[in-house]
Amino acid sequence: MASPVPHPPDRPTGKGTKRPHASIVSAGPVSPTVQSQDAGNQLIASAPPRQLAAGQRVQVFHRFQKNSADLWIPVSSVFAGQCSPRIGTSDGWMSATVTRDWHQEMPGTAMSTTTPSGNNSDISVRFRHRLWSDRRGNITDSTKYPDLCERVSPEQVRVDLSSDDLDPELTFVVVRWGGETRCDPVTDGDGGWGPTGSNVSDPYVKYFFERVVWPTMGPNYQVLTVFVRHSSDLAKIHPPSLLHMCHARKVVGMYFLWPSCFQDSADMPGYVNQAALIQLMSDMEATGIITKFPHHAHLYRQLISKDWMAHLALMPGYNVPATTKVSRGLILDHPERAARLAVDALESVSYTHLTLPTKRIV
């Protein structure tokens, strides 16, 4: 029976041994069914099942981005789902129960994956996690929907794995937009981003995890997602608490937001105050969650503020056009005087370019 509510999962919290986190990661291609090089890691070493019975408990790798129409995440409490920022494990191993008998025939047969009815199908499971939240704070209690189930591919299912064995190789801490207004992917037209959409949009994030991470790593990663609705949410994020929720030995941060200097607005989804974003990135890196997208905090600060242009403009060898900076307060109080000072500064920098010898920068 179809239901408009999410397809639930469960991720044990506060269990398992936390391993010391590493600040940087280099993960090579890993097939979901190929044995891991780490003998102690059973995530990849255990092959997908070939036969399952209804009522059997299994571990299922929940993929948040697989169904972009219903983006729901498991949350630990109603408070965690309704109050922003909203935080939950969007991709990772969770407990589930098989709802229909299933078996996989030998490869090469006409129908390799079957149910007792003979229809080609994935594995039908019911996740055991109770509370779910979407990005808008709507809460669903899965116990109120006994017929709620989800179909998953065999490579997302493992049996005989305890929660202590489910430590992935890599955890992504993803900070992304979760406001009322969705971010426009702007795929077409002048300035369009193409099929992936803009880097704050849902299609872009989905493309990264479904077309890059999953094919490369298989079910050997975790995604801890933080949905923010405005700039003030960034200051509420506590990096040490996030690190405690990460189950992998390597943890990295990714920020799918656009920094800006203007006031937050519902008409500008995806934009947050640049100072608040840089501060969060710096705090996360100080905790050990190193930024992998877009850039490390110190470099990103230089790029988005354009400070590098005014600095390198004084060095002719870099061939940067004459650039200066003007105080915003001066522009508001005395716009004509600010313009005169800017022109004088640009002329001075241009004169410097003409008089100083040009050196080749290696």
Image: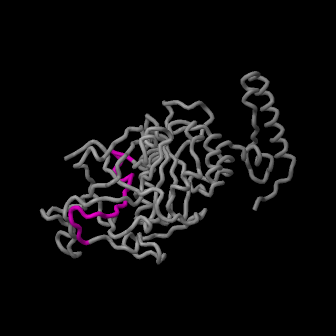
Residue situated furthest left in the rendering: 117
| Viewer-nearest residue: 284 or 144 | 144
Locate residue 357, reporting x and y percent: 85, 53
| Image point (55%, 63%), residue name | 250
At 82% from the left and 54% from the top, the residue drawn is: 358
Quarter of the image where one finds residue 9: bottom left
Q: Give the quarter of the image for residue 310.
A: top right
What colouring does the structure picture have? Answer: one colour
Instruction: Tell me where residue 192 appears, x and y as whole percent.
Output: 47, 43
**Left-right relation of 265 to 295:** left
Picture coordinates of residue 280 (x, y %)? 61, 46
Whether residue 119 appears in magenta in the rendering, the answer is no
Residue that lies at the very extreme toward the front in this rendered image:
15
Residue 291 visible within the image: yes
Q: Is residue 93 above or below residue 294?
A: below
Q: Position of residue 31 (x, y in %)?
A: 40, 71
Q: Is residue 212 left or right of residue 68?
A: right
Q: Magenta span has 62?
A: yes
Residue 11 horizontal side relative to residue 347, left or right: left
Question: Across the whole image, how many numbered discs are drawn on residues?
Answer: 0
Closest to the observer: 330 or 345?
330
Q: In the picture shown, does residue 202 fall above or below 344? A: below
Q: Which residues are magenta?
A: 50-72
Q: Nearer the viewer, residue 86 or 57?
A: 57
Quarter in which the C terminus is drawn? bottom right
In the rendered image of this protein, does residue 301 appear above or below residue 94?
A: above
Say if residue 189 shows up in the picture.
no
